[in-house]
Amino acid sequence: MPAVTDLDFCAIDVETANHSPSSICQIGMVRVKNGQVESTFCALVNPEEAFNSFNVRLHGIGPDTVRSAPSFDEVFAEVFDWLDGAALVSHTFFDRRAMNGAANKYGLPIIPAIWLDSVAIARRAWPHRRGGRGYRLANLAHDLGITFRHHDALEDARAAAGVVLYACLETGKNINDWLREFER
């Protein structure tokens, strides 16, 4: 397997209070430098919206959990600094829609990041090996030996980062290679 350099990126995941992508109630981020997790960030967020019982059952975060948590506009500066200009990985583009929706909701700027979808990377890295089980994060993580607690934003971000790192190592492609591939 070839040595891969330029493995610097951030992975992000959000959990939402209801069907609206802008109803973020938790943000998890993982910064990867030289192929290693360098740092993490996780914050509960008060979405200032009602919680749907389905979402609460899924991730276990409810109105009481976030009652004293900051709203998205109150954590935005830290999130913005963390992600500004980074190659940003999410598992599907739901998280991108959520971040942009929450920014719009509060009249904040869109984070200037270059987004990569770990599902799209996995499909290219393992077109035959993963096809039968699909590309859900839980399936990929299980197949790759990544243990995590699903539907926790930080854990999901860590798993998405792991999927991308495995794909880079197995294909010999780095983050810039994936960015160029998806620009086409």
Image: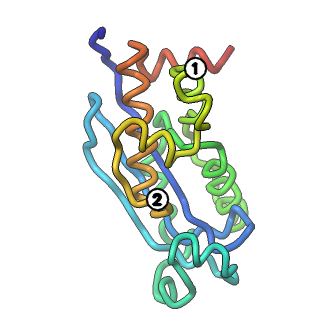
Q: Where is residue 62 in the image (x, y as percent from the top left)?
A: 55, 83
The residue wearing badge 1 is 128
Q: Which of marks 2 and 1 is nearer the N terminus?
A: 1
Is disc 2 in contact with disc 1, using a CB cutoff of under 8 Å? no
Helix, strand or loop for disc 1:
loop
Residue 142 in percent (x, y) is at 42, 44
Whether residue 19 sits left or right of residue 14 in the image: it is right
- Residue 15 occupies quadrant: bottom right
Please identify the quarter of the rendering in which residue 54 is found.
Answer: bottom right
What residue is rendered at 43% in x and 35% in y? 163
Residue sticking out furthest to the front? 132
Q: In this view, does 32 lie above or below 121?
A: below
What whole-number distance in Å separates the C-alpha atoms at marks 2 and 1?
A: 25 Å
Name the residue at 54% across, 35% down: 118
Q: What residue type is labelled 1?
A: His
Q: Where residue 6 sits in the image (x, y, percent)?
A: 34, 21
Amino acid identity at mark 2: His
In front of the other: 32 or 118 = 118
Q: Residue at x 69, y 79 (%)?
A: 52
Mark 2 Cα within 10 Å, few/some/many (few <14, many 20+)? Answer: some
Is 134 left, or right, of 81 in this rendering?
right
| Residue topped by disc 2 | 150
Instruction: Please identify the quarter of the rendering in which residue 112 is found.
Output: top right
Which quadrant would the N terminus be assigned to in this image? top left
Residue drawn at point x = 42 percent, y = 68 percent:
43
Quadrant placement of the C terminus: top right
